């Protein structure tokens, strides 16, 4: 089945740009978030969004974004993290099964257990598609993927600098909030450890990174980037989604318990079941 007109697939919300004209977003990112993130998605002309439940996790952080999207008038659904690989939008589109939704989705007749494809076919006639306006010369949606970091997202891209046992740490809620100044940093973030997140870690050349495991999920997608990061010379670990909230870098630092460590981490005697802070202390 071809992707319907007006639908865009993105592996990461970090790839979404204000120039987007697709009203329906099928995204590999988690369904966590906050008011600012939901506002950003709305400001990028998204009316409907499908995201990953990320194991739901501590304080239901993996689906916390549903209410924020609803407040912005965005119909939002989360797919079961065991039905589709987190960080892989194509799998969300092809295999995603709805596990949670906001009241806008319920009002549209969407039900738990529906597939993403079924859901989109059910609601597509109700969605206004700006890509069909006369200002656009073709029928394909614009996502702005060729545009570099956009200043309109600067208010979201918050980082905190701290130290653990004298070791400097960069804390951020999302790996997508990093920039060229983070090269060589030890990063603790609230992102999942999937392939799209690993891409950002490599892009910015971090020294080490601690992720949330997002429930690990289908085909171990929540930790899938760790091996490739080790090959790229980046030490990487994931924290149990039940020990720390996804999209909450500070909680990962303060409360995260390690579930998976790559070979570089193991070579520094970092092991599963350690706290994130215990692991960082071994990076001296």
Image (spheres, rainbow, N blue to C red):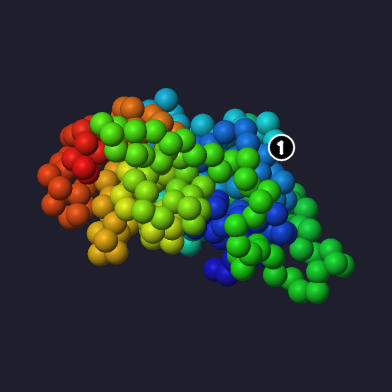
Residue lying furthest right: 134
Residue lying furthest bottom: 137
The mark tally for this picture is 1
Q: Position of residue 112 (x, y in %)?
A: 50, 39
Residue lying furthest top: 59
Q: In the visual, does 120 lie left or right of 178? A: right
Task: State whether residue 77 appears in this view.
Answer: no
Q: Which of the 4 image quarters holds residue 5?
A: bottom right
**Residue drawn at the location 36% of the way across and 39% of the way down:** 169
- Between 164 and 108, the residue placed more toward the observer is 164
Q: In the visual, does 237 lie left or right of 130? A: left
- Between 219 and 39, the residue placed more toward the observer is 39
**Residue drawn at the location 31% of the way across and 50% of the way down:** 208
- Between 14 and 215, the residue placed more toward the observer is 14
Q: In the visual, does 32 lie left or right of 231? A: right
Q: Is residue 273 above or below residue 6?
A: above
**Residue drawn at the location 81% of the way across and 69% of the way down:** 136
Q: In the visual, does 109 lie left or right of 251? A: right
**Residue drawn at the location 87% of the way across and 67% of the way down:** 134
Q: Which of the 4 image quarters holds residue 244?
A: top left
Task: State whether residue 55 appears in this view.
Answer: yes
Q: Is residue 277 above or below residue 46?
A: above
Residue that numbered label 1 is attached to: 73
Q: Secondary structure at mark 1?
A: loop
Screen quadrant of the C terminus: top left
Mark 1, Cα crowd under 10 Å, few <14 / some 14-19 / many 20+, is: some
Q: Position of residue 119 (x, y in %)?
A: 59, 50
Q: Position of residue 209 (x, y in %)?
A: 33, 47
Screen quadrant of the N terminus: bottom right
Q: Position of residue 172 (x, y in %)?
A: 46, 40
């Amino acid at each position: 089945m071809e992707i319907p007109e007006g639908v865009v697939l993105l592996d990461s919300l970090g790839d979404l740009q204000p120039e987007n004209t697709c009203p329906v977003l099928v995204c590999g990112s988690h369904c966590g978030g906050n008011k600012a993130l939901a506002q950003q998605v709305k400001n990028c002309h998204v009316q409907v969004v499908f995201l990953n439940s990320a194991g739901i996790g501590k304080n239901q952080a993996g689906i916390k974004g549903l209410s924020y999207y609803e407040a912005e008038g965005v119909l939002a659904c989360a797919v079961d993290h065991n039905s589709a690989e987190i960080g892989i939008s194509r799998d969300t589109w092809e295999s995603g099964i709805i596990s949670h939704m906001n009241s806008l989705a319920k009002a549209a007749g969407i039900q738990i257990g529906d597939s993403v494809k079924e859901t989109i076919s059910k609601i597509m006639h109700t969605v206004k598609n700006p890509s069909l306006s006369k200002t656009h010369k073709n029928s394909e949606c614009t996502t702005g993927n060729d545009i570099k970091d956009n200043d309109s997202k600067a208010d979201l891209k918050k980082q905190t600098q701290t130290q653990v046992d004298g070791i400097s740490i960069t804390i951020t809620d999302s790996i997508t909030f990093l920039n060229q100044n983070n090269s060589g940093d030890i990063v603790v973030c609230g992102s999942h450890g999937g392939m799209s997140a690993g891409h950002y870690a490599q892009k910015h050349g971090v020294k080490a990174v601690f992720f949330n495991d997002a429930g690990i999920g289908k085909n171990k997608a929540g930790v899938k980037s760790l091996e490739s990061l080790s090959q790229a010379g980046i030490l990487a670990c994931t924290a149990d989604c039940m020990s720390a909230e996804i999209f909450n870098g500070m909680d990962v630092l303060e409360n995260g318990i390690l579930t998976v460590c790559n070979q570089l981490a193991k070579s520094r005697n970092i092991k599963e079941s350690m706290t994130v802070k215990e692991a960082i202390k071994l990076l001296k």
